[in-house]
Structures are given as structure tokens and as C-alpha cells.
Image (spheres, rainbow, N blue to C red):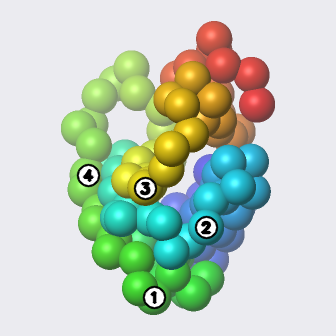
Amino acid sequence: MERNEREEIFANVAELLALIVEENKIDIEDIGAVIFSSTPDINAAFPAAGARAMGWSEVPLFGTLEIDNPEGVARCIRVLILWNTEVPQKEIKHLYLKGASVLRQDLKN
């Protein structure tokens, strides 16, 4: 993410969630909860509010702050989806967009 602005936070959350849902063929009703974490340099909006703005009104959402680590990725939002599924773990597609791809260079999107 380039800027700490509400519109950009919401756009990035929407992009990430839409791709995760699409790539993994997730039915929103099968989501138990979603946990967002963000780096301290993101404070213009709660990432969870971005999910609410895109219509995720029934999904329990939680946000947390990552530690301020000099080796961390700047302006980074992570999402952990607690998903009721029978898909084997090795078949779940984990997505790392933009600069976050350095977190898991072993995975290809």
C-alpha cells in the first residue's frame, strides 16, 4: 500500500478479500471470523471497516496491531480467515499482494 489513507486502506482490503474468496471458492457464510493485523504506519482507518464497507456485515471481524519492527514490511495489512472447510490445507491458496510478497517468497500467486 502506498499511502495511509482511508480510501486506499478500504481498496486494498477489498482487493485482498475478493481475491482470497475467488481463488479459494469461499462462500462468505462459511467464514467463522476474520482477523486483520496492520503495521503501526496504518492508522487512517481500521482494515476491518473496509470489510464492513464491502458488505461483510455478518462476519465477526477483529483487528490488531503488529509490532513496530524495523525489518517488517511497511504499510502492510494481513488477514487470517477462519474458514469452515474440508479443503485440505495444502490446497488452500495463500495470497501475498504487492510488497507483502517478500513475506513468503516460496509461494507464487
Q: Amino acid at mark 1?
A: Ser
Q: Secondary structure at mark 1?
A: loop
| Dot placed on the residue nearer the N-terminal end, 3 or 1 | 1
User: Which residue is disc 2 drawn over?
Assistant: 27
User: Which residue is disc 1 drawn over?
Assistant: 57
| Dot placed on the residue nearer the N-terminal end, 2 or 1 | 2
Label number found at residue 84: 3
Give the Cα distance between marks 4 and 1.
Answer: 22 Å
**Quadrant in the rendering for residue 36:** bottom left
Q: Amino acid at mark 4?
A: Leu
- Asked if marks 3 and 1 touch (Cβ < 8 Å), the reply is no
Q: Amino acid at mark 3?
A: Asn
| Dot placed on the residue nearer the N-terminal end, 4 or 1 | 1
Q: Residue at x 56, y 40 (%)?
A: 87
Label number found at residue 38: none
80, above or below 105, in the image: below
